């Protein structure tokens, strides 16, 4: 049993390493394209044909363009990710992880080496379940990676192509949207990321609420039908 679990964990780890390698390679490719004006600018200009009518507003409202782009990415990423995620399995894995951590702390505090070894063996099975959930969650991102890649290049070129780079914000009425930084990142990237994360979070919560409510009502109907 322990041997089969170990083999399963190794296989899952190999798959995870492959997916992480693909994402890392794509990230490096994106950095290379963005840092090379000879590739970035022509590609961004070509993408204007698609994205400018939808999100660009002909450079008139750069803040709205940035926020809308983050919203679009948040929507497109969260919807398929939701349906690829086994939420019951994820919840179970989280509960098992909390129980495992608590049991391990108690065993180490009491100096129970036998129990520590048993818990360490159980950890392999726990890791296998967690990796399965993580891989299923990453699958839709892998499929849509090319689209995300292109839209990030477009928004980058869009920002650099602004003829008038100054905008009014609540804390500064004369702020350069291109050169201003927030922490380590340009302000426009921070705005884009916040819109992406917030929209993705709320869309996931809304879908989860309606999906789980529907499933619970279906279970209740089945129970009532069986009782009758």
Image (cartoon, rainbow, N blue to C red):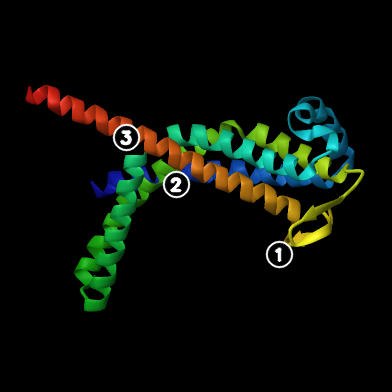
Are the residues at dot 2 and dot 1 in contact (C-beta closer than 8 Å)? Answer: no
Q: Which mark is residue 183?
A: 1
Report the residue marked by disc 3. Answer: 213
Residue 177 seen: no
Give the image quarter of residue 27. top right
Q: Nearer the viewer, residue 216 or 2?
A: 216
Task: Tell me which label, 2 or 1, sits earlier in the chain.
Answer: 2
Give percent across and percent down for residue 35.
Answer: 82, 47
Give the image quarter of residue 147. top right
**Badge 1: how crowded within 10 Å, few (<14), some, or many (20+)?**
few
Q: Which mark is residue 211?
A: none
**Badge 2: how crowded within 10 Å, few (<14), some, or many (20+)?**
some
Question: In this rendering, which labeled residue sits more in front, label 2 or label 3?
Answer: 3
Q: Nearer the viewer, residue 178 or 136?
A: 178
Picture quarter with the C terminus: top left
Q: Which mark is residue 13?
A: 2
Outermost residue on the bottom side: it is 110
Q: Is residue 124 left or right of residue 195?
A: left
């Amino acid at each position: 049993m322990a041997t089969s679990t170990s083999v399963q964990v190794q296989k899952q780890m190999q798959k995870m390493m492959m997916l992480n390698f693909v994402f890392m390679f794509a990230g490096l490719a994106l950095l290379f394209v963005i840092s090379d004006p000879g590739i970035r600018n022509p590609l961004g200009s070509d993408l204007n044909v698609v994205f400018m009518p939808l999100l660009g507003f002909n450079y008139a409202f750069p803040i709205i363009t940035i926020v809308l782009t983050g919203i679009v990415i948040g929507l497109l990423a969260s919807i398929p990710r939701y349906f690829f995620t086994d939420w019951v399995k994820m919840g179970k894995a989280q509960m098992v992880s909390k129980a495992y951590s608590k049991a391990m702390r108690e065993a180490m505090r009491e100096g129970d080496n036998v129990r520590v070894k048993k818990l360490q063996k159980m950890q392999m099975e726990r890791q296998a379940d967690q990796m399965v959930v993580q891989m299923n969650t990453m699958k839709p991102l892998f499929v849509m990676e090319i689209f995300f890649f292109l839209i990030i290049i477009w928004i980058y070129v869009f920002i650099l192509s602004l003829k008038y780079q100054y905008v009014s914000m609540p804390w500064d009425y004369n702020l350069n949207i291109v050169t201003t930084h927030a922490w380590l990142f340009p302000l426009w990237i921070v705005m884009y990321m916040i819109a992406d994360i917030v929209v993705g979070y709320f869309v996931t919560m809304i879908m989860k609420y309606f999906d789980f409510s529907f499933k619970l009502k279906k279970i209740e109907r089945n129970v009532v039908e069986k009782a009758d």
